[in-house]
């Protein structure tokens, strides 16, 4: 009961202090706001990069050309052998007739030439479209498939695929480092801003210590203050994230630069990001306060 | 009965300055004692050790049987709840009213509201500020502010009241009023230690006088006056 009363009092005091010392609290709030806006932008950016990386990667396919002379039996054998490779996710079969039909549709010239062929004359190859689980090992997998009997050749956009994979990897790491770095910088900035605000209340802390307040009951209102400051500081970044991202999505129709790069749908994505921002604001605010007030307590 | 017992207390600051040398001092329960001495004689260090703002480097300080020097930082608040401290500069919170300033300490302990109210009003009444309970410190005179800080110090009925130059910022008449308030509190059974430079109040009150000189106990008068020959 006693501790509950102290807590209730400290919650009340935390609120009071924020509004009584609003000009100082405002400094901390703006500091959190500005950095959280940048954090929001980097989270949105990295999430989107992550997303379209995944979309592009999902499209990575190894095309396996089967020798023209292969029989039905050979085909099943090839399929079952490909299936034994661990990295293979799925296999789709496309017969030479299907390939021919596709090509006929794609151009008039092809149509003219190919229409003269009959069933047995088709010089094209049957193909398997193989999707892999881990695209970083795509070349390895392709090599293994190539060695299977009756496989004519494999194609997977050699070189291009590998360089794209490594570029995406780098982009992802850079963005993750940016987000983490920003959070650390924010925490540091906030600790310092709150230190300045607490500096002006040294006397209050001193008096509390002299009249026999325990360290915890001195710290608590400051931590609650940090929580309030963190929450208030994340309001504007959250609004910017939710509205800004929806507007961006609408204006671009969900695609930027090319058809290739698709944006993540605004809902519930922007709500997740808002949740993360609020969490960062609150944790950083509380951590900042408790770290800053520690200096004035003899613990 | 010995309430405060100091045995061979020595205080050396980190800077290498020795503030107190081998001090032995006993103060009885219910005593009223002045601690006097020139600047740098160790008065402030002595009382800071009593409320455990400083630790003695050597020796032992017992208050009501508790070894204050051995108290851990985390536990200091338990000692502070049993004593009241009054400062020269009052140390009131400017944004709180008189009532809130006095109730402040009790709220920190998590007492129920009704008990806080009752004890606070009692303390404010004792120092004669009942009419000004809703005023803010800046609306009060120096003497009134000091009375608020006394009320705050005694609100939890401490066994010991430590006053560090309580009249240092006040004119002679107001100083006497403050001393009268302290006498009343003393008569209620609280042990009081007053550090002061104020010749007049020491001479008028005729209480125990402990004279410090360069960190050593020079004289200890039972019903003393401020010796005119002492350079202070």
Image (spheres, coloured by chain):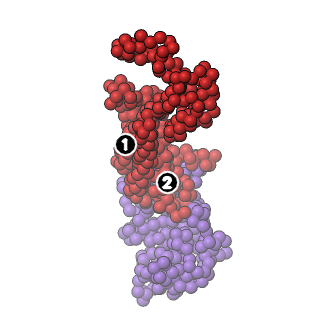
Chain colours: A red, B purple
Q: Chain of mark 2?
A: A
Considering only order in the chain, which callout, 1 or 2, is on the residue closer to the N terminus? 1
Residue B163 position within the rendered picture, expressed as x and y whole percent measured from the top left: 49, 69
Give the chain letter at badge 1.
A
Residue B172 position within the rendered picture, expressed as x and y whole percent measured from the top left: 38, 71
- Measure the C-alpha gap from mark 2 to mark 1: 24 Å
How dense is the environment of label 2, judged by Cα within 10 Å: few (below 14), some, or many (20 and up)? many
Task: Please tell me whether mark 2 or mark 1 is closer to you in this view.
Answer: 1
Q: Badge 1, how many Cα within 10 Å: few under 14, some, many 20+?
A: some
Assign the C terminus of chain A to one quadrant of the image.
Answer: bottom right
Identify which residue, B137 or B131, lies in the foreground: B137
Give the residue at x 47% y 61%: A295
* Local secondary structure at mark 2: helix
Residue B97 seen in the current view: no
Left or right placement of residue B57 versus residue B176 in this view: right
Residue matched to label 2: A290
Q: Position of residue B50 (x, y in %)?
A: 55, 72
Left or right position of A70 against B177: right
């Amino acid at each position: 009961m006693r501790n509950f009363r102290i807590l209730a009092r400290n919650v009340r005091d935390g609120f009071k202090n924020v509004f009584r010392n609003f000009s100082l609290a405002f400094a901390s709030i703006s500091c959190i706001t500005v950095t959280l806006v940048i954090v929001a932008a980097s989270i949105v950016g990295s999430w989107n990069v992550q997303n379209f990386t995944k979309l592009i990667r999902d499209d990575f396919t190894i095309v396996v050309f089967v020798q023209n002379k292969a029989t039905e039996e050979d085909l099943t054998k090839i399929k079952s052998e490909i299936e034994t490779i661990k990295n293979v996710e799925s296999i789709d079969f496309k017969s030479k007739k299907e390939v021919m039909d596709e090509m006929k549709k794609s151009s008039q010239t092809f149509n003219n030439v190919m229409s003269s062929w009959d069933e047995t004359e088709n010089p094209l190859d049957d193909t398997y479209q193989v999707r892999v689980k881990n695209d970083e090992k795509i070349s390895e997998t392709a090599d293994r498939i190539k060695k299977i009997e009756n496989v004519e050749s494999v194609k997977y956009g050699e070189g291009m695929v590998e360089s794209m994979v490594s570029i995406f990897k780098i982009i992802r790491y850079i963005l993750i480092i940016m987000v983490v770095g920003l959070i650390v910088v924010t925490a540091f900035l906030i600790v310092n801003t709150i230190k300045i605000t607490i500096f002006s209340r040294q006397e209050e802390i001193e008096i509390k210590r002299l009249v026999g307040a325990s360290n915890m009951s001195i710290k608590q209102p400051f931590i609650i203050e940090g929580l309030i400051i963190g929450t208030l500081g994340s309001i504007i970044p959250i609004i910017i994230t939710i509205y800004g991202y929806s507007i961006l999505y609408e204006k671009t129709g969900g695609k930027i630069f090319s058809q290739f790069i698709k944006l993540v749908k605004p809902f519930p994505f922007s709500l997740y990001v808002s949740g993360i921002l609020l969490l960062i604001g609150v944790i950083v605010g509380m951590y900042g306060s408790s770290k800053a007030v520690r200096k004035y307590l003899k613990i | 009965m010995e309430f405060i017992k100091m045995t061979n207390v020595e205080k050396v600051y980190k800077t290498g300055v020795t503030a107190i040398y081998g001090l032995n001092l006993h103060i009885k329960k219910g005593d009223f004692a002045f601690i006097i001495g020139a600047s740098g004689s160790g008065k402030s260090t002595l009382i800071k050790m009593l409320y455990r703002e400083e630790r003695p480097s050597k020796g032992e300080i017992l208050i009501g049987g508790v070894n204050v020097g051995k108290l851990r930082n985390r536990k200091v608040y338990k000692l502070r709840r049993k004593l009241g401290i009054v400062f020269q500069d009052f140390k009131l919170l400017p944004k709180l009213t008189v009532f809130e300033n006095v109730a402040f300490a009790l709220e920190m302990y998590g007492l129920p509201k009704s008990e806080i109210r009752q004890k606070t009003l009692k303390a404010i009444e004792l120092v004669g500020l009942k009419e000004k309970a809703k005023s803010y410190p800046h609306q009060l005179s120096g003497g009134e502010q000091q009375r608020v800080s006394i009320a705050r110090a005694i609100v939890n009925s401490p066994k010991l009241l430590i006053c560090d130059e309580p009249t240092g910022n006040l004119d002679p008449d107001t100083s006497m009023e403050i001393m009268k308030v302290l006498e009343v509190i003393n008569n209620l059974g609280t042990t009081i230690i007053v550090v002061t430079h104020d010749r007049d109040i020491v001479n008028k009150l005729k209480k125990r006088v402990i004279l410090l000189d360069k960190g050593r106990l020079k004289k200890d008068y039972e019903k003393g006056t401020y010796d005119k020959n002492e350079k202070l």
